[in-house]
Amino acid sequence: MVKAIWNNTVIAESDATVQVEGNHYFPPSTIKKEYFKTTDTHTNCPWKGVASYYDIEVDGDVNKDAAWYYPEVSELAKGIKGYIAFWKGVEVK
């Protein structure tokens, strides 16, 4: 079971993550949605597509744009469409 932990709280856990470029992408149904807030941030990956971001909020602390996902993907990245990955101090283990 892979877990994403921030601020001493498990914010996602799954035994069905997909690893791409060293990141675990979690199926959308495996995140604890109460900790995720959609942002207006977007970035572009040349081979995956346009990423959207979430802020993570736990116990009043906010980790800005600490999770990302691809709502639409290229054919090459179809296995991670909608899946969520983490950075900015979120521990994935």
Image (tube, helix red, strand yellow):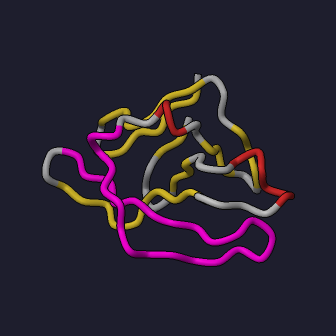
Residue that extends furthest to the left in the rendered view of this protein: 60
Quadrant of the drawing holding the C terminus: top right
Where is residue 25 drawn, in percent x and y?
63, 45
Residue 89 sits in quarter: bottom left
Q: Is residue 43 left or right of residue 20?
A: left
Verify whether residue 57 appears in magenta.
yes
Dominant secondary structure of the magenta stretch? strand
Q: Is residue 64 left or right of residue 83?
A: left
Where is residue 21 drawn, in percent x and y?
76, 56
Residue drawn at x 22%, y 46% is 58
Q: Is residue 24 left or right of residue 68?
A: right
Where is residue 84 drawn, in percent x and y?
55, 48
Numbered marks: total? 0
Residue drawn at x 56%, y 57% is 69
Residue drawn at x 27%, y 40% is 34
18, above or below 63, in the image? above
31, above or below 40, in the image? above
Quadrant of the drawing holding the N terminus: top right
Where is residue 83 drawn, in percent x and y?
60, 46
Report the front residue among 44 and 71.
71
Verify whether residue 87 appears in magenta.
no
Report the front residue among 89 and 39.
39
* Span of residues in magenta: 33-58
Residue drawn at x 44%, y 50% is 90
Report the front residue among 9 and 15.
15
